[in-house]
Image (cartoon, helix red, strand yellow):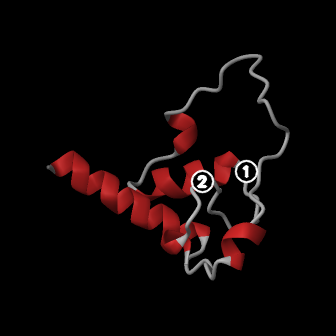
Amino acid sequence: TLVEQDDVWQTVVGTGVAYPISRWLELCFGQVGLNWADHVRPVPGFRPEFDRLVSDPKTIRGLGWEPRVEIDELSRLVMQEVSALASA
């Protein structure tokens, strides 16, 4: 498993499925009844370092990890935690 490794190394935990950032924003803001476009302003002229950024799940899956939630469920879980932290 991931925590039982002898060597320390970095990896990205991801499914290998790419989504546009606008989809993530739509899901997260939607959890609280907001339209992300009313609250997020793109930086004029901004060029990201990468055209497409998506994980290669080969390494992490080789250790027995498999994703259990889809992006919509992940956004719900994240926003629940944000809400709990904001209420604390």
**Residue at image location 23% in from the left, 46% down from the top:** 86
**Residue at image location 61% in from the left, 78% down from the top:** 65
Judge whether 56 appears above or below 50 on screen: below
Q: Which one is in front, 6 or 33?
A: 6
For this view, does 70 lie left or right of residue 50? left
Q: Which one is in front, 63 or 67?
A: 63
Residue beneath disc 1? 20
Disc 1 secondary structure class: loop
**Residue at image location 76% in from the left, 59% down from the top:** 18
Q: Residues within 10 Å of mark 1 (few under 14, many from 20)?
A: few
Judge whether 62 appears above or below 20 on screen: below
Judge whether 41 appears above or below 9 on screen: above
Q: Where is residue 51 in the image (x, y as percent from the top left)?
A: 85, 39
Q: Position of residue 26 (x, y in %)?
A: 57, 52
Disc 2 secondary structure class: helix
Residue beneath disc 2? 24
Q: Tag 2: residue type?
A: Trp
